[in-house]
Amino acid sequence: MTKTEEMKRNGTKNRKKRKLWLKIIGGILGTLVLFMGIVFVVHAISNGVEKKKIEPYGQYVNVDGKKMNVLIQGSGEQTIVLLPGQGTPSPALDFKLLIDELSPNYKIVAIEPFGYGLSDETEKERTTENIVSEVHEAVQQLGIDRYVLMGHSIAGLYGASYVNTYPDEVLAFVGIDSSVPNQPGMDVKLPLKSMQFLQESGLMRLLKKVSGDPYGGLAFDEHTKEQMNLISNQVTSNPTMMDELRHLGSNFKNGEQLTYPNDLPLLLFVQSNNEHNEQWIPLHEEQVKQSAQGKMIPMEGSHYLHHTKFKEIAEEFKAYMKQIQ
């Protein structure tokens, strides 16, 4: 075989290989597009079907021309206003176990900020100031003028701003593994576009499906778990929640000097086994020193302490309120 013939033969082989690889790559891409198309269509259809299965709870109050959902339970003399952690899909249902423990003795008002639960979304920027102002307007609409402010996670930042803005209204602040305004690492850039794509494409629904029940092993009844999952599929990564995440770094930066008033009773339930932040306990110890009646109670559990320690939180809270009165 001559050199020219060998080169032609090798060229033909290479072209066949390229065509084969192109076919394989094309097949993979086609399968991927088909898969994504099916996932998206299933997600869109499921959203429509599931939306009709969501059962209303609570009541609406008019805030800034929009509807904000609040759940009121119990008729005690003292009122507790409950604020959720960032991204909690259905705050009122997420707090249900703790609300059931507290409501025999207190009037509980669980607020679902804009973008959460059954509340409307809003185009107003999710700055701390706007969120605090909206929550306060909801409380005013309900005619509540004196209350304990209790909140989970990011409510530690919003709550610190709230109690300084409305000092004559808040009787005490209670944090459930609440954020500390000067905690480190809050300037991280979040992959917001990727998060939104996962939700809007239906991939997040698929991931949740294969990862199992997020509320498995907890004391929620099956109906409540179903409702929380239905609402989560509807509201997770909506534009209002995404804007709150977009403002996360600047909200912490602007609030890093916030402290609690010395004369405000302060009770903090803190996760004792936080492996991601070794300073978690010391940061909260510094916070309780800001209050003449500050107290910190370490608890072993997940960040959502109220999912597993709701009985202990309720008992410790009641004992603390008797102590400061």
Image (tube, rainbow, N blue to C red):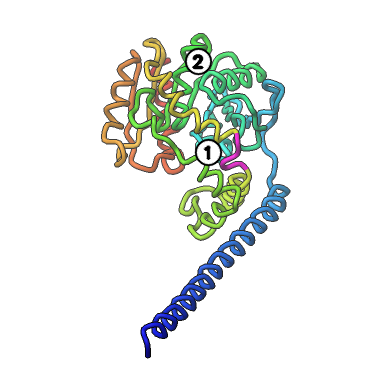
238 lies left or right of 252: right
**269 w.r.t. 23: above or below:** above
Q: Amino acid at mark 1?
A: Thr
For the N terminus, give its image quadrant: bottom left
Q: Which residue is mark 2?
A: 170
As rendered, which of 219 and 141 lies closer to the eye? Answer: 141
Q: Amino acid at mark 2?
A: Val
Q: Magenta region: which residues?
A: 235-239
User: In the picture, residue 104 is in which quadrant?
Assistant: top right
Q: Which mark is residue 224?
A: none
At numbered mark 2, what does the secondary structure look like: helix, strand or loop?
strand
For the C terminus, give its image quadrant: top left
Disc 2/disc 1 C-alpha distance (Å):
24 Å
Q: Which residue is mark 1?
A: 88
As rendered, which of 271 and 147 lies closer to the eye? Answer: 271
Q: Does the magenta portion include 238? A: yes
Q: Does the magenta portion include 213? A: no
Residue in view at x 61 percent, y 17 percent = 144
217 lies left or right of 54: left
